[in-house]
Amino acid sequence: MFPKEEYDSRIFKLRKWMESKKVDLSIIRSGANMSYLSGTSAASALVVPIDEDPFLIARYAFGDKIAEEQTAYEVVTVKPFYGLDKVDDKKISFLIKDEIKKRGMRTRKLAFDGNEQEEEELRRAFRRGGKSLPVLSLSREILRIRAVKSEREIETMRKSADISVNAFYSTVSEIMPGVTEKEIAGRIELEMRRLGGDGPAFPTIVCFGENSFNAHHVPTERKLREGDIVLIDFGSSYSMYASDMTRTFVIGKPEKKLEDLWNAVYESQEKAIMKLKAGVSAEDPDKEARDVLNKRGLLDIFVHSTGHGIGLEVHEPPRLLVGVKDKIERNYTVTVEPGIYIKGWGGIRIEDTLVVRSDGSEVLTRGLIKEMELKRY
Ligand SMILES: [Mn+2]
């Protein structure tokens, strides 16, 4: 959790958009966006009026206490009435409306962030004499604001990456012939928590040998053998912020084929990272990565984008992919992760999380060894 001024500055950015759209009131229900604007995702909704203090609505015993601990804003606790012969379990949208009405706030035009069902419910709650209110969608706008990270956020993401890197080093001595994918995945996740993280930001991917072909492999009982490729894609969550990194190496001496392919992916990542700086388009690093692989005849086995935004969620806009014209701005945090995949043989992916600066980028997943052969540390 950050000091209140951090959230106030985020709310300020939201309000500038509200002003430009003549929106009286924003209602945020999706977890990551609520958390971004208020510090907590434990409430049911965050209400941001254009000219009054924001407040949260949380359910009694289902998040109200957690929300109070996590946010600097007011938390209104609501409680369905549980009587002997009747339970009055009002939908949250109606409770939001009641609270807004009680405060006498203007609601000529609303903005909303949440899922379709929640939006439908909200429209019903605010219907007046058969007429529904104009409701603008807020989700894209908040994601746009979220893309540019503050220095506090970057520091938190650096810590998240450090925890992951250290979890890797605490596990590396276990990566020995005979160990299973599940054992290594479990150990890394345990270490993340032991080192102060909240746990993995996404289920840890550990692949041995030909399993590395599957970009979203789920760890199995497959035992590690001499000569196997090992691909580990992992990242912890720390203070709600994710990190994401992948390393691929071999146990024993790499064969010539692996050496050539590994070097190609390595160079592809290097070139893409060199392209990354404020002002470029989201497709530029991707084009660079593709160009390297194309020159080696490997373009058709690079079957995903070069990277993605990351922050409160593992996958945030923008995608680094040819055709995506979004401008990359200073303090965007993104992954760069080219990979190639050969069915029946395996895959190689190398990934880091970086922060974009005016003149280049800075690696957040610092200190994580990037070598073809596993050495023990
Ligand atoms: Mn990734």
Image: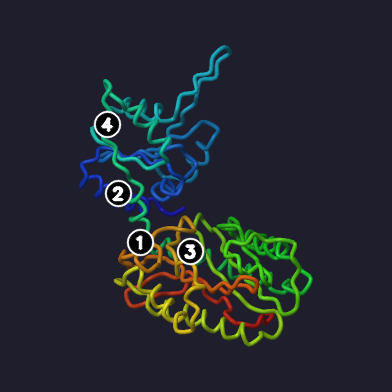
Residue 139: % across, % down: 36, 47
Give the number of the mark in front: 2 or 4: 4
Label number found at residue 148? 1
N-terminal-most mark, 4 or 3: 4
- Crowding at mark 3 (Cα within 10 Å: few <14, some 14-19, many 20+): many
Q: Could you tell me which secondary element the residue under label 3 belongs to?
A: helix
Tell me if residue 55 can be seen. yes
- Amino acid under disc 2: Leu
Give the number of the mark in front: 4 or 3: 4
Q: Quadrant of residue 355?
A: bottom left
Mark 3 and mark 2: Cα distance apart in space: 23 Å
N-terminal-most mark, 3 or 2: 2
- Crowding at mark 2 (Cα within 10 Å: few <14, some 14-19, many 20+): some
Tell me if residue 273 can be seen. no
N-terminal-most mark, 2 or 1: 2
Is 247 situated above or below 215? below
Residue drawn at the location 55% of the way across and 19% of the way down: 82
- Amino acid under disc 4: Leu
Q: Could you tell me which secondary element the residue under label 2 belongs to?
A: helix
> In this figure, which residue is indicated by the disc labeled 2?
14
- Amino acid under disc 1: Val
Q: Could you tell me which secondary element the residue under label 1 belongs to?
A: loop
